[in-house]
Image (cartoon, rainbow, N blue to C red):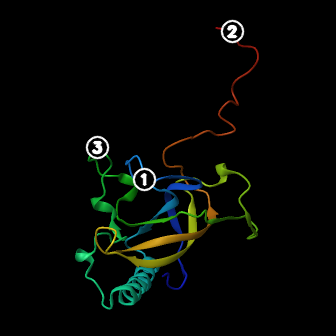
């Protein structure tokens, strides 16, 4: 059972897939989910306040589900991760997570997807290209505890919606800019 809705402070989004669900693991029968990885700077007062509120919601969810709070190290899954310890599939540290707390938020249902325009107007996203890894967002989350039938006990963060509030340097993937071909003319001979 989910707890109250929690709104994040502004964060950099990574592994953003909110238009098409993707497998949550490499297993052939892996569930498909939408998601975003929340990247919060460790030295931010807003981050510290948010994490305290999030941990309080974790505690409530665990007490509701298990009758007691589980220590983080006793959970099969605990969603707050230290970015300075996160590695890619090859074991390399991921520089975009340096000095940050990382929180994966997923859902089997597609989240609400909004964009804030420069004048502060909030509107539904009109193109998947508007929503990308590296942009700045706020997210609406819920917390739930699960187990033991899933092979252990843990807590997870469910993604309800995102609001893109600012463009940022894109992480991975497509990096096309409309002005990349400004110096190209029709006067060049064919190859």
Residue 97 x/y as whole percent: 38, 58
Quadrant hosting residue 119: bottom right
Q: CA distance from mark 1 to mark 2?
A: 48 Å
Given contact means CB atoms under 8 Å apart, are the residues at marks 2 and 3 in contact?
no
Residue 14 x/y as whole percent: 48, 56
Q: What numbered label is drawn on residue 190?
A: 2
**Of pointers 1 and 2, the one earlier in the residue sequence:** 1
- Few, some or many C-alpha atoms within 10 Å of disc 3 (few <14, some 14-19, many ≥20)? few
Camera-nearest label, 1 or 3:
1
Q: Which residue is mark 1?
A: 30
Residue 152 x/y as whole percent: 28, 71
Residue at x-position 57% and y-position 66%: 137
**Of pointers 2 and 3, the one earlier in the residue sequence:** 3
Residue 79 x/y as whole percent: 37, 70
- Compare residues 110 and 116 and report the one nearer the observer: 110
Camera-nearest label, 2 or 3:
3
Secondary structure of residue under mark 3 = loop
Quadrant hosting residue 164: bottom right
Camera-nearest label, 1 or 2:
1
Q: Residue furthest front?
A: 149
Q: Residue furthest left?
A: 73
Residue at x-position 65% and y-position 49%: 129
Quadrant in the picture for the C terminus: top right
- Few, some or many C-alpha atoms within 10 Å of disc 2 (few <14, some 14-19, many ≥20)? few
- Few, some or many C-alpha atoms within 10 Å of disc 1 (few <14, some 14-19, many ≥20)? few
Secondary structure of residue under mark 1 = loop
**Of pointers 1 and 3, the one earlier in the residue sequence:** 1
- Compare residues 76 and 6 and report the one nearer the observer: 76
Residue at x-position 43% and y-position 81%: 54
Q: Is residue 159 left or right of residue 165?
A: left
Q: Which residue is mark 3?
A: 90
Secondary structure of residue under mark 2 = loop
């Amino acid at each position: 059972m989910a707890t109250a809705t929690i709104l994040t402070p502004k964060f950099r989004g990574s592994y953003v897939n909110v238009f098409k669900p993707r497998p949550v693991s490499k297993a052939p029968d892996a569930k498909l989910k939408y998601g975003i990885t929340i990247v919060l700077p460790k030295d931010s007062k807003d981050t510290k306040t948010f994490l305290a509120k999030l941990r309080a919601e974790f505690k409530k969810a665990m007490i509701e589900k298990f009758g007691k709070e589980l220590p983080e190290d006793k959970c099969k899954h605990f969603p707050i991760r230290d970015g300075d310890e996160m590695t890619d599939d090859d074991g390399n540290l991921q520089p975009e997570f340096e000095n940050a707390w990382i929180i994966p938020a997923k859902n089997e249902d597609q989240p609400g997807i909004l964009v804030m325009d420069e004048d502060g107007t909030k509107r539904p996203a009109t193109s998947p290209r508007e929503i990308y890894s590296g942009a700045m967002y706020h997210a609406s989350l819920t917390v739930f505890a699960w187990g033991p039938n899933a092979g252990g006990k843990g807590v997870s963060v469910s993604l309800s919606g995102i609001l893109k509030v600012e463009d940022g340097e894109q992480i991975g993937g497509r990096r096309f800019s409309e002005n990349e071909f400004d110096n190209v003319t029709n006067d060049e001979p064919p190859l």
